[in-house]
Amino acid sequence: MNTDWDDLRFFLALHRHGSLRKAAAALGVNHGTVLQRLKRLETRLGAHLFDRTRNGLVTTETGRELAVHAEQMEETARNVRSAVGGSNDALQGKIRLSLPFALFESGLAAALADIADRFSGIDIDLDVGDRFSRLADLEADVSVRMAFAVEDEAIGQRILQYNKTAFASPETCARLTAGDPSVAWLGWKEPHDEQPWTGNTGYPDLPLRHNAPEHRAQIGLARSGPYLTLLPCFLGDNVEGLQRVPGAALLPDRSIWLLYRTDLRRTARIRLLRDALIAHFEERKAFYVGAQSPTG
C-alpha cells in the first residue's frame, strides 16, 4: 500500500471535523480539494472510509482503524519536525509566521521587511489571514494574534490591549452630520448571532445593513458606501479614504498576542523575530493602542 501522508492529513481532518466544509477551513483549502484527496485515498486503499448522514460524515469501521495508524504517523511527523526545527541555533533558515490582515496592513509588513533586509539568512514563510494557525500541530512557528485569550500549547505573551471605534469616509461623515437617513452601520455578524453591539458606539439608532465579517470587506464597503464600520483604531487610522467618525465612542477590544512553539524557544532565529516584534510594538504602542486620534 502506497499511501501519501499528505492524503492521510486530509483524512484526519475529515475524521475529526465530520464535514467537508469544516475540514477545508481547518486545512486552509477549499472543500473540493478535500473531496478530491478523500476520493484518491479511498481509491488507493480500495476501501470506503466515510458514510454520509444527515448530521455529516461518519467514519466507517475501516476508517476508524485507519485513523489510529494515521494519528501515529502524525505524531511521528510532529516529533521529527520538532527535533529538526529546534536544533538550529544559527540566524538562518525559514520561519513560518502567521498573523492577521489588520496587523499586516497597519505596520508589521514594514517591520518584517526590515528584519528580512537586516538578516539575509532568514526566510519568512508568511500566512496572512484571520484563521488561527495551530502551533501544536506545527502549522506555524510563530503566531501574532488579535484575541481576548489564547489556549494554545505554546510560549507567548500578551503585548497590549487595543481600542476600536467607528470609521467612515469623509463623505459619509458629512451625510451623517446632515441627518441623511441612508447612512447605516455595516454589519459584521450573522443575523442569528446579532447582538445590540451598536448601543455603546455613540450612534445606537443607525440601522444595520449587510454582513461583512472580514476587515478587508468592511474597509471596501465603508470607502464606497454610506456606512459606518467598527475597526481597530490602528487599522482604520492607517486606511486612506477613511476617518474616525466624530462623536463615536472609543471601545476597548481584544489584545495583541505573540506566540511561538515551545520546542523552538531556544532557536536563535525565533528569538530574533520575537525580540524584533516586541520592540516594534513597544516603539509604536500609542499607535497600536489607538487611544487618541492621530490628529490629537
Image (cartoon, rainbow, N blue to C red):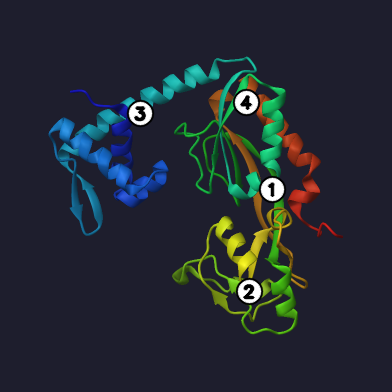
Residue type marked 2: Pro
The residue that disc 4 covers is: 270
Sequence order check, earlier mark of 2 and 1: 1
Q: Position of residue 138 (x, y in %)?
A: 47, 31
Determine the image quadrant of residue 11: top left
The residue that disc 1 covers is: 106
The residue that disc 3 covers is: 74
Determine the image quadrant of residue 221: bottom right
| Quadrant showing the N terminus | top left
CA neighbours of label 1 inside 10 A, class few (<14), some (14 to 19), many (20+): some
Q: Which of these two is toward me, 76 or 35?
A: 35
In space, the residues marked 4 and 1 are separated at their CA atoms by: 22 Å
Residue type marked 1: Ser
Residue type marked 3: Glu
CA neighbours of label 2 inside 10 A, class few (<14), some (14 to 19), many (20+): many
Element at label 2: loop
Q: Residue at x 61, y 18 (%)?
A: 92
Q: In the rendered view, would you say 109 is above or below 233?
A: above
Element at label 3: helix
Sequence order check, earlier mark of 4 and 2: 2
Frontmost of labels 2 and 1 is 2
Q: Residue at x 68, y 76 (%)?
A: 203
In space, the residues marked 4 and 3 are separated at their CA atoms by: 24 Å
The residue that disc 2 covers is: 226
